[in-house]
Amino acid sequence: MLDTSARLLRLLSLLQTRKEWSGADLAERLNITTRTVRRDVDRLRELGYPVDGTVGVGGGYQLGAGAEMPPLLLDDQEVLAVALGLGAGATASVTGLDEAGVRAMSKLRQVMPSRLRHRLDSLQVDATPMRAPASQVDATVLSDVAAVCHRHERLRFDYRARDGAESRRDVEPYRLVRSGLRWYLLAWDLGRDDWRSFRVDRLTPKIPTGPRFTPRELPEGGAAAFIARSIGSVYRQATARVRIHSPLEQVAEMVDAAWGEVESGDVNSCEVALFGKSLTSIARWLYAFDADFTVVSPAELRTECHEVADFHVKVAERYRNA
């Protein structure tokens, strides 16, 4: 069981994480009795923390308005999670936070108990240099976009598309979504009268922002699902159907839903639908099945396969004659 002072901090921390707690829930989390919970709540009130309580069925405790929180209320695991996140460069896809991260880490260490500083020091490791991500977002831009999403204010920005084309967009911004190391904005494009996703590293916000808007219902599945579908469409610009002369059971294990679907087959062969950025990329993938295959459609894929094969023959001849 925690001692009284540590238990009070833990109780205060719990009260911050949920609007309302029942006495029984707090007792279970702190491994104490409900009577001790009542006494601890009284102690917090004596220390100046406004803890409101209600009795009866559905009653419980919650922090009142105007509560002044201590500078740090994290348990041991939470402190280590934050520190390791800062130390591991969790914001590699966001620029402009290097110095802020160092300052935050320094301040965090100052308020850490010595036992946690020792644990953190024991977790220090060397890391090999990493190449910067292909796309990085300025922290100020990310913050500005997040703010207009929160305030439901229209946003104008200059945008550079994948092919380099530039345009001015006027949108109702809704959510920021991170996929891997890239950041995307889900917005209702007023010029296209439809939902669109935008890479944040390709947009330049215009200030001041526009008027407030009434939020629409998000597309099916929410923001993250919409972004996932948008990203997936990039890799489905070309489709093909190929019969792989290998057992269905063996081929099925090799096909990922992100780029293919096994449609039919038996112990001798199976038909697979493949998706890619181009027919050339699909032709290059086919060797991975390590089996003979027959192109079902489109006919253009056969030409791409011949060109890929000719290229490898030329490379082999070059090495043979070297």
Image (cartoon, grey):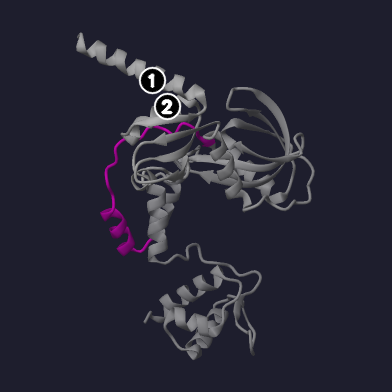
Horizontal placement of 285 versus 13: left or right? left
Residue 158 horizontal/vertical position (percent) = 67, 29
Please give the residue where the numbered disc 2 appears in the rendered image.
Answer: 283
Q: Residue at x 61, y 27 (%)?
A: 161
Please tell me which residue lies in front, 159 or 76. 159
Q: Please tell me how crowded label 1 is: few (under 14), some (14-19), or many (20+) other residues with Cα within 10 Å.
A: some
Q: Can residue 110 be seen here? A: no
**Residue 190 against residue 279 in the figure, above or below:** below
Residue 254 horizontal/vertical position (percent) = 37, 43
Disc 2 is placed on an element classified as helix
Q: Amino acid at mark 2?
A: Ala
Q: Residue at x 64, y 43 (%)?
A: 186
Q: Can residue 57 be seen here? A: yes
Please tell me which residue lies in front, 179 or 147. 179
Horizontal placement of 312 versus 243: left or right? left
In the image, is residue 135 part of the stretch drawn in magenta? yes
Horizontal placement of 41 versus 132: left or right? right
Highlighted magenta segment, given as a residue range: 112-137
Q: Residue at x 55, y 44 (%)?
A: 228
Please tell me which residue lies in front, 46 or 72. 72
Horizontal placement of 322 versus 240: left or right? left
Please give the residue where the numbered disc 1 appears in the rendered image.
Answer: 308
